Amino acid sequence: MLKSLEPKVLDIVKDANKSVDTRLGEICELLQSNVDHYDWVGFYFKNGDKEELKLGPYAGAPTDHTIIPFGKGICGQVAVSNENFVVPDVAAQDNYIACSITVKAEIVVPLFVNGENVGQIDIDSNTPDPFTAEDERFLEFINAEVAKIL
């Protein structure tokens, strides 16, 4: 299922007539509307020289979490660890920032440009423990393609 979305992601990324933010938003919309367990999809990016992340394009319910300090929550931890973070049950995580009471699981995959962690893709799911290695590989693919246009 996820593999079938890869050509569509490539088409979005390659459309140089649109701004980077527009393309990122289209990727978020594509994922949220085509993957049942992707209820909120967004990109966070390092906020200049600050030790924090700033919300970029996203699809899903509005969030109050537009700035996340490094180390705080799942996204903030990924900004420090530079590693994928899959959370099968957010209620079991001490350092979790709740975006919505309906969220049961989260996956965050860092986005690297020239070896530097510049941001991440963040997915919230209202389904308990839905994420697999296939989700991780798919999101790594998306970030590798997005890195080419940043």
Image (cartoon, rainbow, N blue to C red):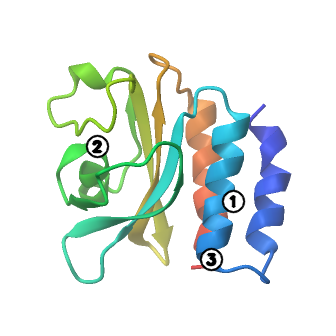
Amino acid type of disc 1? Glu
Tell whether 75 sits left or right of 145.
left
> Of callouts 2 and 3, which one flags the residue occurring earlier in the amino acid sequence?
3
At x 40%, y 26%, the residue is 105
Q: Marks 3 and 1: in contact by CB < 8 Å? A: no
* Residue kind at label 3, given as amino acid type: Val
Q: Nearer the viewer, mark 2 or mark 3?
A: 3
Q: Residues within 10 Å of mark 2 (few under 14, many from 20)?
A: many
| Disc 3: CA contacts within 10 A as few (<14), some (14-19) or many (>=20) | some
Q: Quadrant of residue 110?
A: bottom left
Q: Say which residue label 1 marks.
A: 26
Q: Residue at x 56, y 79 (%)?
A: 150
Q: Answer left or right for 52 relative to 32.
A: left
Sequence-first disc among 1 and 2: 1
Residue 64: % across, % down: 29, 51
Kindly identify which residue carries mark 2: 74
Is residue 94 at least partly visible in the picture? yes
Residue 141 visible in image: no
Secondary structure under tag 3 reads helix
Mark 1 and mark 2: Cα distance apart in space? 24 Å
Q: 102 or 132, which is in the foreground?
A: 102
Q: Position of residue 136 (x, y in %)?
A: 55, 40
- Point out residue 103 in the picture as x, y percentages from the top left corner: 39, 27
Front-most of 57 and 88?
57
Q: CA distance from mark 1 to mark 3?
A: 10 Å
Q: Which residue is mark 3?
A: 20
